[in-house]
RNA sequence: GUGGCCGUAGCUCAGUUGGCAGAGCGUCAGGUUGUGGCCCUGAAUGUCGCGGGUUCGAAUCCCGUCGGUCACCCCA
C-alpha cells in the first residue's frame, strides 16, 4: 500500500472483487437456510444510544469498557457504533410489544470494536446472527444450534467443533461466581497476573485461561455446573439429549465461558482449526434482556464472517477461474461499431450479460479483452458480416465459429443467461 | 491497550559494506493491416508507506508515525 491517504483506517478493509464473490455466495446460501428455519431479516441501525450497549452487554465487560466506538453527537447525546448485533435487535423486538413475542429474525451487517487487528479480526467486522425470541425451552435451544451447524455446513465447513455449556439462571450465576471466587482466593498467588485481576472482576474467565499454571488449578476445581441449581442442570441435560437425538456432535465443556452479561442457560461456541490461537468463529447462547421496561428472552448466535471466510479459504481454496456467462461483442469498422453498440444494448435489455470495447481497439486487443474477462461467447461483426447480413459467433472455450442470422443468434445468446 | 516480525512497480518479491531503482508475473503495443489462450520482440509503470535525523551520499543506519501480520488481552 502506497501513501497514507490511500490506506483504510487500522482494522478497516475495502472489500471488492475477487473476495467479494465469496461474501456474496455465503450470504445467499445463508439466506436460503435461514428461510428454511422460519427466520426473516431485520436491519437495525448501526448507531445506537451508548446506554443500550452498557445495559445489555454489562458495564464491566471489556467490550463496553475498552472496545466501543463511543462519542457525543452535536445534540450532546451519547452514541456508540454497535459492537454486536443482539442489543439492537432486542431493542427493536421490545418496541414491537406483543407482536414480537415469538419473533425469529436474523441480521447480517457491520459491527465495530476498537481492538488490535488479527487473523479474522477487524475493527469493522461483519456478523451474521439470529435471535429466536421466546421463553426458555430446551427444544428451541437445540433447534437454533442445529440451524447454526446447518449454516456452517451449507458453506462447506466440515472441520467445525461445537462446544457447549450452561451459565445457569441469573440467580445461579451470582452464586456460582461467589463460590468460584471463594475457592480461588486462597490460591491467588499461584494464578497469573491476568487471573489475579479476573478474580476481582469476571471470575469465570479464570476457567478458560490458557496459562498452564492456571489451567492446572482450574482442573482441580469441581465443575462449574455443580454450583448451579438442579433446574439449570436439567435444562442443559435436555438440550444435550435433543442434540444427540438429532445426531449433532458436540463437546460438553464445563469451562466454556461467554463474556457478555446477558447470557443465561445454554451457551456455545464453534471453533475451527484454521483460525490459529483465536479459534472461535461463532458463539451463541440463551439470554434475558430488559430494555425499556420490557423483559425479552431468547436464544441466538452470531458468526464472525471474516473468521468464517478464513476457515473457508483454508478448507476450500477458491476454485480455479472458469468461463463466465458473458457475451463479448467484437466490432471492426465504424458501421459495425455503431451496429454492435445497438446490439449490445438490446442484449442487455434482454438480461444477457454482455460487454464490448468502446475504445475502437484492434480486433486482437478486443479478443484479448474478451478472454481476460472470461467471456464464453464472442459475437464478431465486421464489413464482411455487415454485407452478408450475418453475425459470426465464436465459442471461446473451444474456438468453434459459426455464421448466424439474428433470430438464431439471439436464441444462442439467451442460453448464456442460464 | 501490550509485545515480536514486516512495508520496494497493479501482484509476488530481490536489492551485497550506505554509492545509478531491479526481476518474474500482470498490463499495453507489435510479430498476424479480421481472431483470445502458447511463443517471440518491445514499451509503460516507483513520493522504496509517511515524517524527521545521521551522512559528501540513505531503499539500506537511528527516532517517530501510519498500515499489515502474529501472539497476549477480549471477543465473533
Image (spheres, rainbow, N blue to C red):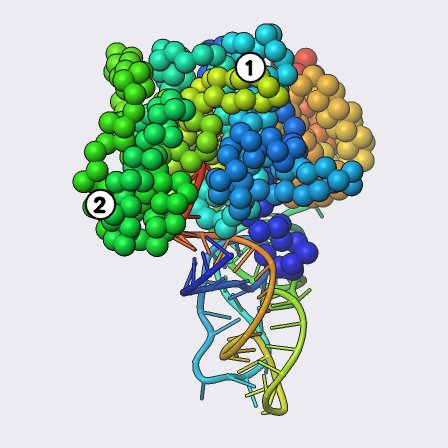
Task: Judge the density around disc 1: few (<14), some (14-19), many (≥20) Cα neighbours within 10 Å.
Answer: some
Q: Earlier in the sequence, mark 1 or mark 2?
A: 1
Q: Which residue is mark 2?
A: A217
Residue placed furthest toward the top: A98
In the image, residue A131 lies at what x, y percent? 50, 19
User: Disc 1 marks which residue?
Assistant: A40
Left or right of A211 on screen, residue A24:
right
Q: Picture quarter containing residue A85?
A: top right
Q: Position of residue A157 (x, y in %)?
A: 37, 29
Residue at point 47% right, 17% down? A298
Subunit bearing disc 1: A
Relative depth, front residue between A376 and A170? A170
* Residue A194 in sight here: yes
**Residue at position x 25%, y 40% from top?**
A183
Circle count: 2
**Residue sitting at x 54%, y 40%:** A64
Disc 1 secondary structure class: strand
Q: Are marks 1 and 2 on the same chain?
A: yes
For the C terminus of chain A, the quadrant is top right
How much space separates mark 1 and mark 2, taking CA atoms?
45 Å
Which is more toward the observer, A202 or A151?
A: A202
Query: Residue A160, image x and y in percent?
Result: 33, 30
Quarter of the picture containing the N terminus of chain A is bottom right
Q: A386 or A107: nearer the eye?
A: A107
Mark 1 and mark 2 in contact? Answer it, CB < 8 Å. Answer: no
Viewer-side label of 1, 2: 2
Amino acid at each position: 500500500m502506497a501513501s497514507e491517504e490511500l490506506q483504510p483506517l487500522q482494522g478497516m478493509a475495502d472489500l471488492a472483487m475477487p473476495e467479494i464473490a465469496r461474501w456474496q455466495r455465503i450470504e445467499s446460501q445463508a439466506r436460503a437456510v435461514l428461510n428454511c428455519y422460519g427466520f426473516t431479516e431485520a436491519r437495525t441501525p448501526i448507531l445506537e444510544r451508548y446506554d443500550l450497549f452498557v445495559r445489555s452487554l454489562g458495564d464491566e465487560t471489556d467490550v463496553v469498557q475498552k472496545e466501543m466506538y463511543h462519542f457525543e453527537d452535536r445534540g450532546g447525546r451519547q452514541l456508540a457504533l454497535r459492537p454486536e448485533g443482539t442489543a439492537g435487535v432486542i431493542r427493536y423486538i421490545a418496541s414491537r410489544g406483543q407482536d414480537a413475542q415469538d419473533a425469529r429474525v436474523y441480521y447480517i451487517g457491520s459491527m465495530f470494536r476498537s481492538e488490535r487487528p488479527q487473523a479474522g479480526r477487524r475493527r469493522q467486522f461483519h456478523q451474521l446472527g439470529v435471535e429466536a425470541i421466546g421463553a426458555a425451552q430446551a427444544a428451541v435451544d437445540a433447534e437454533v444450534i442445529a440451524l447454526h451447524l446447518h449454516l456452517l455446513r451449507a458453506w462447506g465447513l466440515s472441520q467445525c467443533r461445537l462446544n457447549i455449556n450452561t451459565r445457569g439462571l441469573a440467580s445461579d450465576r451470582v452464586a456460582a461466581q461467589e463460590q468460584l471466587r471463594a475457592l480461588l482466593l486462597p490460591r491467588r498467588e499461584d494464578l497469573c497476573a491476568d487471573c489475579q485481576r479476573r478474580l476481582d472482576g469476571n471470575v469465570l474467565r479464570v476457567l478458560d485461561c490458557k496459562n498452564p499454571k492456571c489451567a492446572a488449578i482450574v482442573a482441580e476445581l469441581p465443575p462449574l455446573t455443580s454450583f448451579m441449581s438442579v433446574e439449570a442442570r436439567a435444562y442443559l441435560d435436555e438440550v444435550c439429549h435433543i442434540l444427540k437425538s438429532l445426531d449433532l456432535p458436540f463437546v460438553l465443556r464445563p469451562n466454556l465461558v461467554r463474556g457478555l452479561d446477558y447470557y443465561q442457560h445454554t451457551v456455545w461456541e464453534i471453533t475451527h482449526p484454521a483460525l490459529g490461537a483465536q479459534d472461535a468463529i461463532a458463539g451463541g447462547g440463551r439470554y434475558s434482556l430488559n430494555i425499556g421496561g420490557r423483559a425479552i428472552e431468547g436464544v441466538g448466535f452470531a458468526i464472525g464472517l471474516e473468521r468464517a471466510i478464513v476457515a473457508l479459504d483454508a478448507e476450500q481454496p477458491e476454485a480455479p477461474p472458469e468461463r463466465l456467462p458473458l457475451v463479448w461483442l467484437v466490432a471492426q469498422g465504424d458501421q459495425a461499431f455503431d451496429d454492435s453498440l445497438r446490439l449490445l444494448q438490446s442484449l442487455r435489455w434482454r438480461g444477457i450479460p454482455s460487454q464490448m470495447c468502446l475504445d475502437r481497439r484492434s480486433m486482437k486487443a478486443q479478443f484479448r479483452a474478451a478472454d481476460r474477462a472470461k467471456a464464453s461467447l464472442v459475437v464478431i461483426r465486421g464489413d464482411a458480416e455487415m454485407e452478408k447480413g450475418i453475425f459470426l459467433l465464436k465459442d471461446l472455450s473451444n474456438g468453434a465459429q459459426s455464421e448466424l442470422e439474428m433470430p438464431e443468434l439471439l436464441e444462442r445468446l439467451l442460453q448464456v443467461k442460464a
